Image (spheres, rainbow, N blue to C red):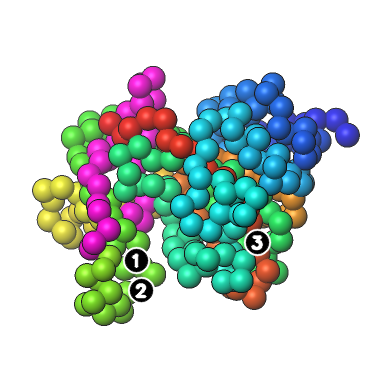
Amino acid sequence: MSVTVSPISAEVGVQITGLAGHQLADPTLAADTRKYLDEHGVVIYREAHIRDADLVALSRLLGEVVVAPMGGQQDFPEVSAISLDPAQSTLAAYRTGTFYWHIDGANDLVPQKATLLTALEVATEGGDTEFASLYAAYDSLSAEDKAQYAELRVVHSFAATQRLINPDASDKIRASWGKVPSREHPLVWTRRNGRKSLLVGTTADHIVGWPEDESRALLDRLLDWATQPRFSLRHQWSRGDLVLWDNTGILHRAQPYTAASRRLMHRTTLVGEEAVA
């Protein structure tokens, strides 16, 4: 089978067919993958059927790999199982938070660089993954909006997401959320190379110094702006697909699915390379 590289849209995503398994754990291909990641934000290798050993090898060629603090595979602690089934994942109870738009590690000074996710089993209902480019969303703002947003700072918190998942939580549970450290970031993330993106998502709790209602209104409006169809894509999984995305500039969320749906993913994560500034 010949290798085909096809951009999905002008704003986000590239799809590659014709490569599988150990072929992906190659230095030259990894260099190409990193280039596609920088250019397109989301890289989809269709039906790659990559095993854990090659997934880890590819991840190491792309950057430093996070060793999962909990739930890593016995032979490959860098690999986490993603499932709502407690028998498959020790963190299953927390996975419903992925049904909301977010970047991973938004509460960190240096968010994770990228995520690699491969499908071992696909959902019988739901379970697609959506992506939205925060780079393209920023670039398409008016000059007036860019000037205003350059001065704003936003507090990101664990509690902001948990309130969506569990709006009727008790005071005790809410107090436990508050024990997780929050982080203040600029609304616009400027990279060392000058590239800029919005930094929004469900972790965005409030704008520093703004009234609560005005703060919420702007954050909601910007999330709606960033996730509109022209900046986003929806990936319908097939068994064996491998998807990589730039976690720092691409929002993502899973379409809701249930523990009975059989959906099972294996994931590796790359350590962040640049602090939010």
- Name the amino acid type tagged 2: Asn
**Pointer 2 residue:** 166
Give how far across and how far down residue 206 sits, in percent.
Answer: 22, 53
Left or right: 46 with respect to 88? right
- Name the amino acid type tagged 1: Gln
**Pointer 1 residue:** 162
Give how far across and how far down residue 219 sits, in percent.
Answer: 28, 52
Q: Are marks 2 and 1 in contact (CB under 8 Å)?
A: yes
Residue at 88 percent across and 34 percent down: it is 1
Picture quarter containing residue 125? bottom right
- Judged from this view, the residue extending furthest toward the right is 1
Query: Which dot, 3 or 1, sits closer to the camera?
Result: 3
Q: Is residue 78 magenta?
A: no
Left or right: 277 with respect to 12? left
Residue at 73 percent across and 46 percent down: it is 51
**Pointer 3 residue:** 264
Q: CA distance from mark 2 to mark 1?
A: 6 Å
Residue at 31 percent across and 79 percent down: it is 168
Q: CA distance from mark 3 to mark 1?
A: 23 Å
Q: Mark 3 vs mark 1: which is more N-terminal?
A: 1
- Name the amino acid type tagged 3: Leu
